[in-house]
Amino acid sequence: MATPGKAPDTGKDADTGDPETREVVVKVRLNASGDPEVSKEYFYVSKSKNEEVRWVCAQEHDCSKNRPCFSVEFKNNDSPFYEYQFSSDAPVSGLVRRNVLPSNQIYKYTVRIGEKSSDPGGGVNQ
């Protein structure tokens, strides 16, 4: 029975009708110059919605032959998550740490593919 004044949980996004997800996907690939790039220069995760980041390989190659095919490391171990290193073998951030509050802070991280790297960032919002 539905609670009065509250829509029943449909498992779908109220605005788009798409299935709800807690993942913010960041695609990792090499650009035309051969440098690493990500699909979102800055990712944002919602702490109140228990969102987490999933970095995924968007290169057209067999990831299993070159493991890990990318790595992610937050600068100075300053990560909004409980861990500060991720890779194609361990691509999910997990939840935002309990002591991290939503803010305008950008957490810088480095994405490496082979010997090349780039430095995007991410943040935590409500």
Image: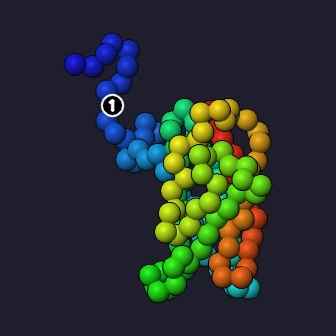
Report the colour scheme: rainbow
Q: Give me the residue at 68% from left, 49% from top.
A: 79
| Residue type of the residue flagged with mark 1 | Asp
Count of numbered marks:
1
Q: Give me the residue at 40% from left, 48% from top.
A: 18
Residue placed under numbered mark 1 in the picture:
9
59 relative to 20 in the view: left or right: right
The residue carrying pointer 1 sits among few (fewer than 14), some (14 to 19) or many (20 or more) residues within 10 Å by Cα, namely few
Placement of the N terminus among the 4 image quadrants: top left
**Image position, residue 95 (x, y; %):** 53, 43
Q: Please, is residue 20 above or below residue 9 in the view? A: below
Q: Please, is residue 95 above or below residue 32 in the view? A: above
Q: Quadrant of residue 74?
A: bottom right
Q: Nearer the viewer, residue 41 or 86?
A: 86
Q: Nearer the viewer, residue 74 or 55?
A: 74
Residue 10 in sight from this viewpoint = yes
Q: Please, is residue 69 above or below residue 6 in the view? A: below
Q: Quadrant of residue 108?
A: bottom right
**Image position, residue 32 (x, y; %):** 69, 85
- Which residue ends up furthest to the top in the rendered image? 4
- Which residue ends up furthest to the left in the rendered image? 1
Residue 108 in sight from this viewpoint = no
**Image position, residue 56 (x, y; %):** 52, 67
Q: Give me the residue at 31% from left, 27% from top.
A: 8
Q: Quadrant of residue 121?
A: bottom right
Q: Give me the residue at 34% from left, 39% from top.
A: 11
**Image position, residue 55 (x, y; %):** 55, 63
Placement of the C terminus among the 4 image quadrants: top right
SS at circle 1 = loop
